[in-house]
């Protein structure tokens, strides 16, 4: 019986979905966010969906606690919980309290993530796993900000519970024993972990790099005037039998988020600067600087009216409505 919770830092679109998965099978979960509004929205989502998820998987829900107090978040859970010994990759009875794992689900901003992790680390038990859900930032970029970088790694979830794959990558300091332990726990929760080989570091994960290239070339086609958003998406949907095209998905993620991720890729990978700088500057000047960020603001690559028409078309085609995660 697990008595220590999984702690989710960030109650946004992706954080609440990760919380939903880990709260099944009687697992306790704590969701921490500095925004009371975000926590209220998160509470509504989990209240509406946790029981249905457990019913469909034949499991039972665990307790979920919501808080804006970081000290409360890091002390929730009973004593005499689990002591994790990653040097030997096994668990044994101990006197820990608080979470056994923290999953950071904050916006894709390195300084924000590192400052948040540095703030919470001293409040955690020494064997607590610290995982970042970042899609483009490597935990090797964050490791120097922690006192114990061996417990830090990337675990990038996509859009659970709909998407069950999780990409797992070392910070280059991560204790080896964490990987067999954590991947087995993920499998127990119905997730499918895909582990980047030890010693391999990648700016972005397997699928994220492929998706980033797709976004980059889509923006280049738009910037050069070769095609329009509706045309690109129509061709994409037709060829891949996809629900949505890259322009619609970028609008859902947020064009400011797309720009921030692309900017970081260009900074860290000079080989893509030549192909990415002009489309990025065009995106900023034409949309982001004007406040046209996509679904969150109204207009983006599509106008609000065009996007609503697309949603109605999806319903007629019986495609399930997909709520995207920030930072995807």
Image (cartoon, helix red, strand yellow):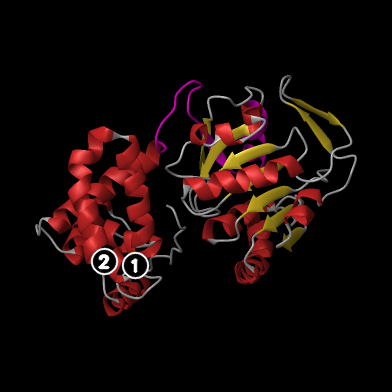
Residue 95 position, x and y percent, is 89, 36
Q: Secondary structure at mark 2?
A: loop
Residue 287, disc: 2
Work out whether 78 lies above or below 286. Answer: above
Q: What are the residue bounds of the magenta stretch?
A: 180-205
Residue 177 position, x and y percent, is 66, 23
Residue 114 position, x and y percent, is 56, 43
Q: Left or right? Give the position of 172 relative to 40.
A: left
Residue 206 position, x and y percent, is 39, 36
Quarter of the image for residue 305 reads bottom left
Q: Are marks 2 and 1 in contact (CB under 8 Å)?
A: yes
Q: Which residue is mark 1?
A: 293
Q: Secondary structure at mark 1?
A: loop
Question: What's the residue at 32%, 39% (across, down)?
Answer: 267
Question: What's the residue at 39%, 57% (across, down)?
Answer: 257
Mark 2 or mark 1: name the one nearer the start of the chain: 2
Quarter of the image for residue 117 reads top right
Mark 2 Cα shell of 10 Å, populated few (<14), some (14-19), many (≥20): some
Q: Which sits in the foreground, 314 or 139?
A: 139
Q: Residue 185: say if magenta.
A: yes
Residue most extreme to the bottom: 305
Can residue 253 be seen here? The reply is yes
Q: Image quadrant for the N terminus?
A: top right
Q: Residue 37: say if magenta.
A: no
Question: What's the residue at 34%, 68% (across, down)?
Answer: 294
Can residue 100 be seen here? The reply is no
């Amino acid at each position: 019986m697990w008595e220590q919770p999984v702690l989710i830092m960030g109650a946004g679109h992706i954080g609440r979905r990760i919380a939903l998965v880990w709260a099944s099978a009687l697992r306790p979960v704590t969701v921490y966010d500095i925004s009371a509004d975000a926590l209220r929205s998160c509470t509504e989502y989990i209240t509406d969906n946790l029981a249905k998820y457990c019913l469909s998987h034949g499991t039972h829900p665990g307790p979920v606690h919501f808080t804006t107090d970081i000290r409360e978040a890091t002390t929730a859970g009973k004593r005499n919980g689990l002591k994790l010994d990653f040097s030997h990759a096994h668990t044994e009875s101990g006197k820990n309290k608080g979470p056994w794992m923290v999953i950071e689900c904050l916006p894709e901003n390195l300084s924000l993530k590192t400052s948040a992790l540095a703030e919470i680390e001293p409040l955690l038990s020494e064997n607590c796993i610290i995982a970042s859900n970042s899609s483009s930032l490597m935990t090797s970029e964050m490791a120097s900000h922690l006192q114990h970088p061996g417990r830090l790694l990337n675990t990038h979830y996509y859009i659970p519970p709909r998407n069950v794959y999780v990409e797992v990558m070392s910070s280059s300091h991560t204790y080896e024993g964490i990987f067999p332990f954590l991947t087995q726990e993920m499998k127990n929760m119905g997730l499918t972990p895909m582990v980047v080989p030890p010693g391999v570091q990648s700016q972005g994960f397997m699928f994220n790099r492929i998706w980033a290239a797709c976004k980059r070339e889509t923006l280049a086609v738009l910037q050069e005037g070769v095609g329009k958003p509706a045309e690109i998406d129509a061709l994409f949907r037709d060829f891949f039998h996809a629900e949505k095209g890259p322009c619609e998905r970028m609008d859902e993620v947020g064009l400011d988020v797309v720009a921030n991720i692309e900017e970081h890729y260009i900074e860290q990978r000079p080989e893509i600067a030549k192909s990415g700088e002009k489309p990025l500057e065009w995106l900023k000047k034409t949309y982001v600087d004007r406040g046209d960020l996509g679904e969150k603001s109204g207009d983006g690559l599509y106008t609000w009216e065009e996007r609503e028409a697309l949603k109605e078309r999806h319903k007629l085609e019986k495609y399930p409505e997909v709520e995207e995660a920030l930072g995807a």
